[in-house]
Image (cartoon, rainbow, N blue to C red):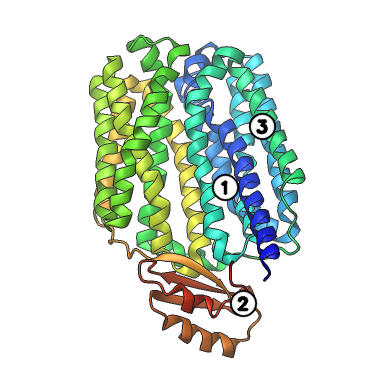
Amino acid sequence: MTSKNADMIFASERRTALSLASIYSFRMLGLFMILPVFSLYAHGLKGVTPTMVGLALGIYGLTQAILQIPFGMLSDRIGRKPIITLGLLIFVVGSIVAALASHANSIEGIIIGRALQGGGAIGSAVLALAADLTREEHRTKVMATIGMTIGVSFAIAMIGGPLINNWLGLSGIFWLTAVLGLTGIAVLHLWVPTPKHSRLHRDTEAVPAQFTEVLADTQLLRLDLGIFTMHLVLTALFVALPVALRDVAGLPADHHWYVYLPVMALGFFSMVPFIIIAEKKRRMKEIFISAIALLALANLGLFEFHQTLTGIVVTLWLFFTAFNLLEATLPSLVSKMAPAQSKGTAMGMYSSSQFLGIFVGGWAGGWMYQHHGFSGVFLFCAGMAGLWLVVALTMRSPSYLSTFLLNVGDIDQARARTLNDALSGIRGVAEAVIIPEDQVAYLKVDNKILDKEALYAFSAGRPD
């Protein structure tokens, strides 16, 4: 490959990563922005109850959990861009329905709108499109770029939601969300390249034939339970927390971002040293278990100290330190523990568990608040984190192996067997599975000792 061609391919992959990350971000912003404000203003809606407030917050998780894997599989048949466009249009329609319902003071209409927003489940199709447009050896970086947008979008939404609500009101947030969805469609068709060929990518897509294997893996099920619990706790917490900040701690609603900005920033910087220790010092399980324990303690702190602003700020800082740490380590653990050729299926199950947790957390948090008040919600969240801690204690220590993809070109079964033996003998390669129809070798490697030069000697398209 000439230097000029390599530069062109790299530029295309970078544009793909940034464009798809922005589309992902626009959608996540729209889903997250009402989290810190909705429970504050929903009391003015006709016939509203706290349980319905929680349902409105979390209902998008149910439709997302149900549809995201089917949407990804459907994109294999009819194309990535048509499915992503359809999903974004459903998201826009849901945002408009919710905006009109908020004008009409209808909690039922907002619940329907939020369910439609989740029905635009484009996550799997976006990742599949990214895989179509990137070389195997560079795909991890592209996926990491897209994945980072979830955390960034959440932080922006937590700070921006109260500000935008103060300027535009609740309906304004939903109208802005619709505009973000339309902007995503424009970015998709104006900036994202169209792949010449689309095919199944086992590292990013769920494969139905692998469902039984993945669901039978008790280590992966522990991680699925973990992401389910973590987002259950998050959503349940925000049914009650904004109201506690305003009505108990005495902080006006338009000043809530004064709390969210510093605790989000401190939570991020506080977790960085522990990420380094977990990965570099290979103490992943110890850090992981400690973070779950801190999550439970933070919710116990909210139960005990939510009467004061200082108490809420300190416990929220601890909460977001634990949350950010777990949000970073859980996908890494899935990648380490899933078989190389089943990573896409494992991540699909993991993502579905996350969204199902959002739904259950919204509903359960609303019910707890309606029947047991602030204290009931915070104690419930602490209890759920405690149960997760008990399950996580029995988790196997991870192997500290990373998934690595190698383009092996068009080979037959006999050549695949020979190549598999050769790759397995390279220093740092712990597992090698070659799928000839994919033209890819799915490897588990130890990056600390991996002989990349020896590995790339077998590549059909060595990266530059």
Q: Secondary structure at mark 1?
A: helix
Q: Which residue is mark 1?
A: 66
| Mark 1 surroundings: few (<14), some (14-19) or many (≥20) residues within 10 A | some
Q: Earlier in the sequence, mark 2 or mark 1?
A: 1
Drawn side of residue 301 relative to residue 266, left or right: left
Where does residue 113 sit, x and y in percent of width and height? 63, 29
Q: Secondary structure at mark 2?
A: loop
Q: Which residue is mark 3?
A: 180
Which amino acid, mark 1? Answer: Ile
Quadrant of image for the N terminus: bottom right
| Mark 2 surroundings: few (<14), some (14-19) or many (≥20) residues within 10 A | some
Q: Is residue 387 visible?
A: no
Where does residue 72 sit, x and y in percent of width and height? 63, 55
Q: Residue at x 27, y 17 (%)?
A: 310
Drawn side of residue 270 relative to residue 13, left or right: left
Which amino acid, mark 3? Answer: Leu
Q: Residue at x 24, y 30 (%)?
A: 300
Quadrant of image for the C terminus: bottom right
Q: Is residue 289 visible?
A: yes
Q: Secondary structure at mark 3?
A: helix
Q: Which residue is mark 2?
A: 460
Q: Residue 408 or 35: which is nearer the viewer?
A: 408
